[in-house]
Image: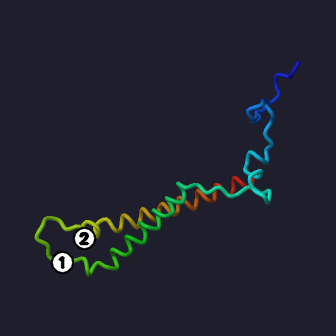
Amino acid sequence: MEQPGRAIEFREVDQDGNQIPEAFRYGAGENSAGSPAPAVNPFIVVLWLLAILLIVGGALIFLNANTMVGPTTSGMPASFLMFTFAPYAIVAGLAAAICLLFWHAFQWQRRRG
């Protein structure tokens, strides 16, 4: 009879009920070198690109402010709106970059033990 205090163990099995080796589950079986390939999260890549786009775009709007100012015949010009939201874009980009750095640090710490 098994002891009730023992921990429950889960294992992955293939279609025939054979246990899958742990090295194969984490990708080492697919590589010839035997070490797992670093998995890149596409959402994190998109967030990095968005943060860079916000920071650079906001800075370019500030640098080109003299060329964007001019008379218009219509209502509110798009250049005025871009110049109005440029500081917020830079702040949002910096906040996203800082949050991503904290996320990377957390993931690194979790992998290290």
Residue 79 badge: 2
Left or right, 50 with respect to 33, comes to left
Identify the residue at image location x=69%, y=52%.
110
- Residue at x-position 75% and y-position 35%: 14
Q: Which residue is mark 1?
A: 70
Q: How far from the left and from the top, in percent, is residue 27?
A: 73, 51
Residue 51 locus on image (x, y percent): 46, 64
The residue sitting at the front extreme is 16
Which residue lies most toward the bottom here? 66
The residue closer to the viewer here, 28 or 79, is 28
- Assess whether mark 2 and mark 1 are in contact (beta carbons under 8 angstroms): yes
The answer to which quarter of the image holds residue 70 is bottom left
Residue 31 lies in quadrant: bottom right
Residue that protrudes farthest toward the right in the picture: 1
| Left or right: 51, with 101 as reference point | left
Q: Secondary structure at mark 2?
A: helix
